Structures are given as structure tokens and as C-alpha cells.
Image (cartoon, rainbow, N blue to C red):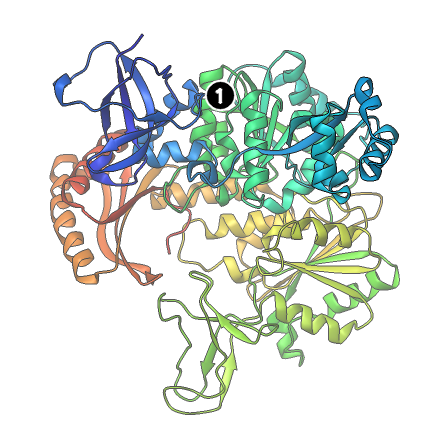
Amino acid sequence: MAKFAKVIIDQDAKALDKVFEYIVPQEMSIEVGMRVYVPFGKRVLQGFVVGLSDSCDYDESKLKAIISMIEDFSAIKKEMLELMKFMAKKNHLKLASILRLFIPAEMREGKVKELFETIYLLNEENVEKLQKNAKKQQEIVEYLKIHNSRASSNEISQYGYGAIKALCDKGILQKEKREIKRTPFVLSIDAKKVKLNYGQENAIKTIKEDKTYLLHGVTGSGKTEVYMHLIERALSEGKNAIMLVPEISLTPQIMSNFKARFGNNVALLHSGLSAGERFDEWKRIFSGQARIAIGARSAIFAPIENLGMIIIDEEHEQSYISESNPRFDTHDIAEFRARFNHCPLVLGSATPSIESYEKAKQGIYQLIELATRANGKELPKIQIIDMMNEIRTGNSGIFSNQLLADLANVINNKKQAMIFINRRGYSSFMRCRDCGYIAKCMDCDVSLVYHREDNRLKCHYCGKQYKVLTKCPKCGSENIKNGAVGTEQVVAKLKEYFPDVKILRMDNDTTSTKNAHQKILSEFKNTLPCILVGTQMIAKGHDFENVVLVGIVDADQSLYHADYRSTERTFQLITQVSGRAGRSENEGKVVLQTYSPRHYVYKFASNYDFKGFFRKEENIRQTAQFPPFTRILRVLFVDHDENYVRELLKICYTELEGLKEKYGDDIIYLDAMKSPIKRIQDKYRYQIMMRFKLAKADMIEEDVFNIVDKNAKTSVFFEVNPQNLS
């Protein structure tokens, strides 16, 4: 038996980011992957056992012993320990912060455990011991006889604890514990038998080797059915699967379809579950009771063994990139797990990312195309409305005359419409018309958003709320103007036009409570006529047969961000939200409102011309030297003390400038600056931005990590090709 354990302390501190050695007491059966309590200085801390050996690297007399095991099983499986090493090298993350990703947070904090209930069983052989005058005891026995000789403590508690105890003492009742599974609510639907078309059958036959496939299928082409057949095949081979979706709002529909097909083999993992549900679903996967893990980004860390298939749906979505600590790209994790398990990885999308499509073009990924809708119907026609023309003809409102006319037609025909505006709240800011003052958060360098329903100004970064401006705090003027339109205002205006129609709203504000996504989508599905207004959470994945119209209120919103991906994201959003219309026998239509109708992105999007858009975007990126032809590295420094962050930035930047001499033209760009949002949650943010050629990218990155690590004592985050430069 091993005498020494290598332990990573469960503390997110730079000084503790290494392996410590402890003695394994003889009476303990410690295994790699277990969580343990260990002495550390004067404290007792949690740790993860990542190795065992018969010898130690230090003076044995100075080593302390493990105090106890937290669980009697290895919570971290061997594959995940290998994944930890990969992520530490690839993403330059602390070991403890990676290990925390692998188990439910509440389990780590000791706030959740198995839930049990007491079951009472009737022992018929001892019923003759029952006294005739014991009325309550007799009632319990009669109840059990009617209910298959068993009942929970809750069911018979009404008869009194004394009567229950007396029956147990006489041996008439026997007690046993039963674990209660806290199962997430899933809408029950019937499993549909779908006849596959040639494209779907070809995709399923093609996807069989342990490599990465890019499944490029237009909206409504039946990608979900392909996913289910691939997983069905993996299960028939005795293997398991992970299926990822980008938004929690997509999990109810996906989960219902998968539950109907695969029953209790499916487990759900995402942040919208309660602590108990998340723990129980994790444990079902861990124990092998569930063989398919479905969920958002975090589900890629599901403790599932013997993987036969990994699928990332809507692979282009930026939500697959973690923008909070620890930072990682889900694609990287999926590729590692697919290699480790020698199984296929499928990336599916109607609008693949430029990076993924470039890899497919180079042969790194195998491209499979589904060029037509599964039902054979045409994609909905996209009509572009020039909002400058609307203003010139006297319409200065939110909606074009065309969109209002089409909405009226939908309502008259008792159908459904979706209205997309990727901004929540009533208006994006409140500004004084006289002096230009804009209400900003005291802790974040961002404008406050007006929410009319709550009559509050809210910060969308830290969540703080403020009173609404009635007069300017700077100049005293009462001439206050609201900024750009949000979902709340769109709903308010629609109610003025269509007062008798059910109008639902789906954004972060209306979906913050448990099962809110499910309730809104279920109500929308069952209401005719109906209009659903929402942010990007309505733009993808949803399949409603009565949606015949999609209105895009402000298509330009994502177009003019100071980000090299802005046109790509605009194309993706338009294509995805347009795909919600006309998915059954009903013909669909899209009304796209813009102030820049001649922009090339609208030309390609209105024709669903992904390949044309890709060629244009590829040429621009190659000429301007942006990813996927180069790599961007952002080093973000964050601290409450602005002077300290600024000084640290200067020190690191001065040393990093020395890399220009070492690497020459391989470093295309290097600069230090304030972050576009200088302060969030009262922490100051400064950054170093670098762009370099791919040939020596890994070497440059390694040098940057070493230079920053040597100097930094504050929170520093490294982001490769960041999704959000703010």
C-alpha cells in the first residue's frame, strides 16, 4: 500500500498552485482522485489526491498525515486528472481552479448530499400482535394493506409518531431508508418516428471515426435527429455520450426529445438546476446510471466514462468560451476528451464559426453538409427594410409599416410571430438632453439600463439597482431622454398596437426563476395567436410549427462593435433567428429592419449564402491579419487598487516589449491600455493586447505567461482569441 499522497490544496491562491505531499495513515484506503482533509499550517483544508507513491521527495520526518477522507470514493476520475494537466498547460490555469470544475460546487462546499426518506414496510407475520384497542395503530396497518404494504414517513405521519414507534417495536413495521432522486422537470412528449432523408443518412454513415466532424446544416435540416441516431449507435455499442447546447433555454426542448427517445439514460447538467438536482444528476452520471449527459458548457466536464460520441450543437456560439475564471474554450476540452476516448466529435451549426470552417477547408475537420430542410420546404424569405426610408416617410417608431402589417396578418390567421431584439430592459440608458450626463453604475464603468416594469435603473454587469432619474444630478434639468430600445419597450409598444393578443417576453429578466424558460416556451407553444419577444435566447434551436413570421427590430446592433467578429456575429444571428420561421407546412417570412441596408453582411444573410460570406470574411481577416490566420492574446489585470494595476501593467509591458527583438515580425501587435470597460464591481481593469503569427504562437505565449507570472501578485487572466474585448 502506498505510503505517500500527492495532494492539490483546494484553494485558489497562486502560492498554493503546486503539489504537496502527505503521509497516508495505514488504516486509510486512499485512492487517486479522492478528496481529503489535510493539515495546512494551523488550518485544516480540503485537498484532491492526484498521485500515490511509496517514496517521497521531501524529508519524511517533516511531512504531516492526511486527517480523513471526505468521501469513500474517488470523486475525480483518472481521465479528468489527465484533463487537468492539459488545461493547466493549454489555458495557464491554477490546478485547484480546474479541479473545481469537475464536481458540483455545493458538493465541494459541503452544502449538498444525498437525500433520503424513511419507508415503512408491513410485516404480515406479526400483525397478530396488534392490540384491538390501539386504534391509530390499526389505521396505519389498514393504510399499508391498501397501499401495497409500504408507505413513506410523510404518508403515515398523520397517525402520530407514537403509534408508528409502537408498531416498529412489535415488529409489525420495518424501517428502511430510500434515496430520493431530485430530478429536473422535463416536459413529457411522445417519441416521434422520423424517416431520415438521404443527407441525414449519409451524415450518420460518415461519422464513425475518432476525429472531428463539422456538420454544416441549414436551419431545420434535421441535425437533432442526426445527433440522436449517432448517440443511439454509441449506446448500442456499449458506449456513452455528451451532448452540448449553448443556452439553458434550449435544454427543455432538447431534453424532452432525448427523454422521449432514451428515457432515464439521460441526465441534465446546467446552472439553472437547484443544488440538489445538480448533485443528483452528477451522481447518476458518475455511477453509470445515466449514459447521456446533456447541458450547456459545464456539461463537457460530466464524469462520464467510455465515451462513444461528443456533440456540440450550435458550435459557433460564444457562450462555449468561458469569460470568467477559470477561462477555457469548450472546443478544446471536447477535442481532448474525444482523443482520450478515441471517439468522434461532432460540431454542428447552420452558421459555423470562421475558425471551424477554415479548419474544415484545410482538412483538419471533416465537413458534412445538409443543404436542405428536412421537410423539403424553402428557407423563409428575408425582406430588408431601410429604416431611414421609414423616417423620411414620417414613421419614427420602433416598427416599420411592413412589420406591423405582417404582424396583423399573422394575428388574423391565428399564427405566431417572434420579434428579436438583442437588448433587454426598456432602454439602454438615460441621458440629460441639456448637459449630456448619462447615468452610470457607481461600481462599473457602464451606463445603467432603464427597466420600466421595476421602475429602476439596473447595471447589467454587477446587478446593482438605482432610482430612476427625474432630473439631472449634474445640471438639474428635467429634460431626460431614454436611449436605444430594449425588449421591455418592444413589448409595451406591441401591446399598444395589439391589445388583445398574448405577448410574451424572453430575456435574462424574465427567465431568472427556476423553470422559467420551460414555462414561457410552453405557453408560447400552446397559445394562438401569440407573439414572443426576446433576445438571442430565442434565436436558435427552437422548433415551433406555427411560427410564420420573424421580425428583427435592430439588425445593426451587433454590427458596429469594435470587434473583428462583429460582422460574423451579425450574419449568424440573422441566419439563426430567421430559421425559426416556416419550420412546418406553413411558409415563413422574415422582416429585417436596418439603417445600413447596403452593408455586405445583409446581402449574404438575406440569401443564406454562408459560403459567399465566408469567402469575403476570410479575405478580410487574412489581409488584416486576424484569427484564424493569427492569434490574439489578451492579458487582463484586475484589482481594487488602480495605481497598483497600472504600475504592474507598466512593468509587464516593458518586459514584453523585449519579445519584439526575440521574435521580430512574428509579433504583429503589442500595446497596453485601459480595458474598454475600465471598472466592473469596483475593480479596475487594464490590459495588454498582443497579436502574433501562428508559426511561433505557442512559444510567444509561453514567454508571456512566464513574464507575467514572475511579476503579478493580483488577479491576472489570459484570454486566447477573446470573444468579448470589453
Circle 1 residues within 10 Å: few <14, some 14–19, many ≥20: many
- Vertical placement of 249 versus 233: above or below? below
- Report the amino acid beneath label 1: Ala
Query: Could you tell whether 459 is left or right of 90 in the image?
Result: right
> Of residues 87 and 416, which is closer to you in this image?
87
Residue 144 lies, in percent from the top left, at 83, 30
**Visible residue check, residue 270:** no
| Number of disc labels | 1
- Look at the numbered disc 1 and give the secondary structure of its residue: helix
Residue 393 lies, in percent from the top left, at 67, 79
- Vertical placement of 399 versus 224: above or below? below
Residue 50 position by quadrant: top left
Quadrant including the N terminus: top left
Query: Could you tell whether 585 is left or right of 540 in the image?
Result: right
Residue 686 position by quadrant: bottom left
**Visible residue check, residue 15:** yes
Query: What residue appears at the point 57 percent right and 26 percent down from the top-left corner?
Result: 285
Query: Could you tell whether 406 is left or right of 645 in the image?
Result: right
- Vertical placement of 603 versus 294: above or below? below
Query: What residue appears at the point 51 percent right and 75 percent down from the top-left corner?
Result: 483
Residue 654 lies, in percent from the top left, at 12, 49
Residue 113 lies, in percent from the top left, at 52, 35
Mark 1 lies on residue = 338
> Of residues 577 and 16, which is closer to you in this image?
16
Quadrant including the C terminus: bottom left
Query: Could you tell whether 224 is left or right of 454 in the image?
Result: right
- Vertical placement of 282 versus 398: above or below? above
Query: What residue appears at the point 54 percent right and 42 percent down from the top-left corner?
Result: 275
> Of residues 137 and 629, which is closer to you in this image?
137
> Of residues 516 and 390, which is closer to you in this image?
516
